[in-house]
Amino acid sequence: MATMGPTTWRDTERWAGNLLRSARAKKGVSQAQLAALAGVPRSTVERIEAGHRQPSLITLSRLLAAIDLEMRVRLEDYDDHDDVLDAAYAAMPPEQQAVTDARHEALVDAFTAAGKQ
């Protein structure tokens, strides 16, 4: 049975926020506009995108529907590529982990920015 290591866990924790940020960029709406369209407080959108709140599937679907998007989920067999990444990450000193985390965030931001174009 597969277990979730730090890489998978971190990416899963940030998945909803990254998805929502990317969706907003694709549709060209601000956090405030999305919140108004979905009928939720702006702080809800901010907290989800920052990774401080994990929305329910219903909430995430409602947010996406407000900007004419829908979420589709596809299940795949487990592979061990994240286990390899977890082992490499665990072997890094804390300073290198911080650099790796910052680069990861920069890539997410770059992909989000590219979605605006």
Image (cartoon, helix red, strand yellow):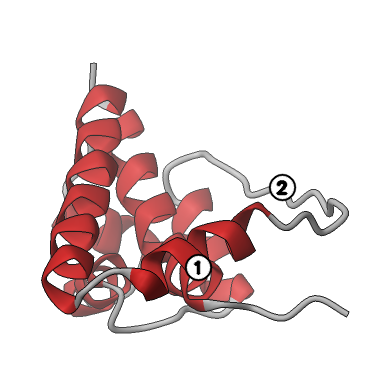
- Which quadrant of the figure contains the C terminus? top left
SS of the residue under disc 2: loop
Residue 36 falls in image quadrant: bottom left
Q: Which residue in the structure is indicated by mark 2? A: 72
- Which amino acid, mark 1? Asp
Q: Is residue 28 visible?
A: no
Say which of 5 and 90 sits in front.
Answer: 90
**What residue is at 17 percent from the left and 64 percent from the top?**
96
Q: Are marks 2 and 1 in contact (CB under 8 Å)?
A: no
- Which amino acid, mark 2? Arg
Marking on residue 86: 1
Residue with the most extreme top position: 117
Residue 101 is left or right of residue 74, and the answer is: left
Residue 106 is left or right of residue 21, and the answer is: left
Say which of 108 and 36 sits in front.
Answer: 108
Residue 53 is left or right of residue 85, and the answer is: left
Q: Mark 1 or mark 2, which is nearer the start of the sequence?
A: 2
Marking on residue 59: none
**What residue is at 57 percent from the left and 77 percent from the top?**
5
SS of the residue under disc 1: helix
Q: Are there few (<14), some (14-19), or many (20+) residues within 10 Å of tag 1? A: some
> Where's residue 109, x and y in %?
20, 42
User: Which marked residue is nearer to the observer: mark 2 or mark 1?
Assistant: 1
**What residue is at 48 percent from the left and 77 percent from the top?**
6
Tally of numbered tags? 2
